[in-house]
Amino acid sequence: MVDQSSQNEDLMQDSNLNEHHHSSEDSFQSLIEENLGAEPAEKVNQDVGAGRGVYISTYGCQMNVNDSERMYSLLEMQNFVPVQTPEEADLILVNSCSIREKAVHKVYSEVGTFRKLKDKKPDLKIGVGGCVGQQEKENLIKTQPMIDFVFGTDQIDNLPQLVAQIYTDKTKRISAKFEHRAPYHVETLVRNPGVATFVNIAKGCDNFCTFCVVPYTRGREKSRPLQHILADVRTLIQRGVKEVTLLGQNVNSYKDSGIDFADLMAAVATETDIERIRFTTSHPKDFNQKLADTMALHNTKIMEYVHLPCQSGSSRVLDRMNRNYTREHYLEKIAMLKKSIPNLVLSTDIIVGFPGETEEDFMETVNLVHEVGFETIFAFKYSPRPFTKAAKFEDQIDEAVKTERLNRLFDSHDAMAFEMVKSYEGQILKILVEKADREFGKVQGRSTSNKLVHFLGSPDLIGKTVDVKITKAFPAVFRGELVQ
Ligand code: SAH
Ligand code: SF4
Ligand code: F3S
């Protein structure tokens, strides 16, 4: 496994640039590619941000949302001031996502909208980070000269140094190496954590599902030490946090010298005063009885909701996806979970139109959705990604067929989901109130099973768990009344 991963990664680092992109041109010889990080952030010029505003545009998953928070925090230490619009900014960062189609195109079109700003403000600097930055490296600057620097997903902690250099020597830079050997030691940096927040426990992915770009854009899997995670959770509690979501590309392959993900969850439940624990995303192949038992044992704290991406209901397709489970295995895991956690609510991710998917394969997916009874599905048309095996499969599916299948899947799920959520009407749920609604006089929060609920209530309720009677239930959102 390890061998295969490192081999794949080397391939990505060395040859893909030639395969997918243009070769270097004379005019870009001044580009500097390097692995920064020699100097800790504190030593970097603190004043570079003084009088300057920073705006970050964030795409993609919760990892990226967390990374953007980290970037803001690090730049604030350099005296940059976060601003609400690109127009007010002196530094604009695009934190990009590459999971599906047109990822690079989206970066270019967003950067294109900053052209006028740069004309007006010649000192405006534009940087691209995130998964497209990691994937494309110098090609971004070569194609779009308005971009001043590119930084990879492992280079966020070096952002202060990179930005300081960009402002001083005016040379374009790329910093996109993976920190292979460095342990994953980061303190959670969130500016305003609110009531419910995320804590990274692992980064990267070694699974190499044949459709997925993440192993190439986030590098090898690494776990944070248990004690660091516990310390973060305790600090967040002191800042008013009541609920944490433990975050990783594949949380249940978490490892810290003999401690697995179930042990980690048990430790967070018993060794901190956190009220609610959630986690995402888990991989079906690693979801075991021990984890289900841990959820059941700590069911007052660990929430009764699991997002378990199946991707397909056809064993033949799952095999070609390199998911390492069959339809039958998946259903066994679901049965085990439902048995251990009686009120469990499930959601999933699905890809339709994976290369070679037949109508029969697709119908197996539709049937699986009904058999399991997912309250929520996140379904996507297959999109070929750079570096991935499936992008080279010859039996790619027509776009029109993908669209038709996706619509059919959503229609079929909608009918079931509207029916399923009706049973919540009249029930009293425990809601952790997260914030005031846009609608005056209302607040919103989440149920133990992760349902978003809006109801009339005072902002004093924020941070409290209250009983709410559900009056109207739609698949994505509920309305209710506070039970006094
Ligand atoms: N680590 C998670 C998934 C992270 S990506 C897991 O293994 O479940 C989030 C979702 O994006 C995936 O579950 C998948 O459904 C979808 N996805 C990933 N690559 C895709 C691609 N090439 N085309 C379409 N959807 C994709
Ligand atoms: Fe991508 Fe998830 Fe598969 Fe990893 S486990 S390769 S992140 S889909
Ligand atoms: Fe996108 Fe990278 Fe997350 S590709 S989904 S931002 S890990």
Image: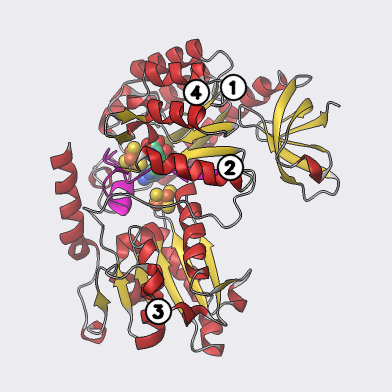
* Between 325 and 188, the one nearer to me in the picture: 188
Mark 1 and mark 4: Cα distance apart in space = 28 Å
- At 31% from the left and 38% from the top, the residue drawn is 355
- Work out whether mark 2 precedes mark 4 in sequence or the reverse, and give the earlier one: 2
- Work out whether mark 2 precedes mark 1 in sequence or the reverse, and give the earlier one: 2
- CB within 8 Å, label 1 to label 3: no
Q: Is residue 227 above or below residue 125?
A: above
Callout 3: SS? helix
Please name the residue that numbered disc 4 is placed on: 369
Please name the residue that numbered disc 1 is placed on: 300
Crowdedness near tag 3: few (<14), some (14–19) or many (≥20) residues, C-alpha within 10 Å: some
Q: Which residues are magenta?
A: 196-222
- At 17% from the left and 40% from the top, the residue drawn is 2
Mark 2 and mark 1: Cα distance apart in space = 17 Å
Mark 4 and mark 3: Cα distance apart in space = 51 Å
Please name the residue that numbered disc 3 is placed on: 164
> Which label belongs to residue 458?
none
Q: Is residue 472 above or below residue 391?
A: above
Residue 456 on image: x %, y %: 84, 38
Callout 2: SS? helix
Tell me: is circle 1 under 8 Å from ligand 1.
no
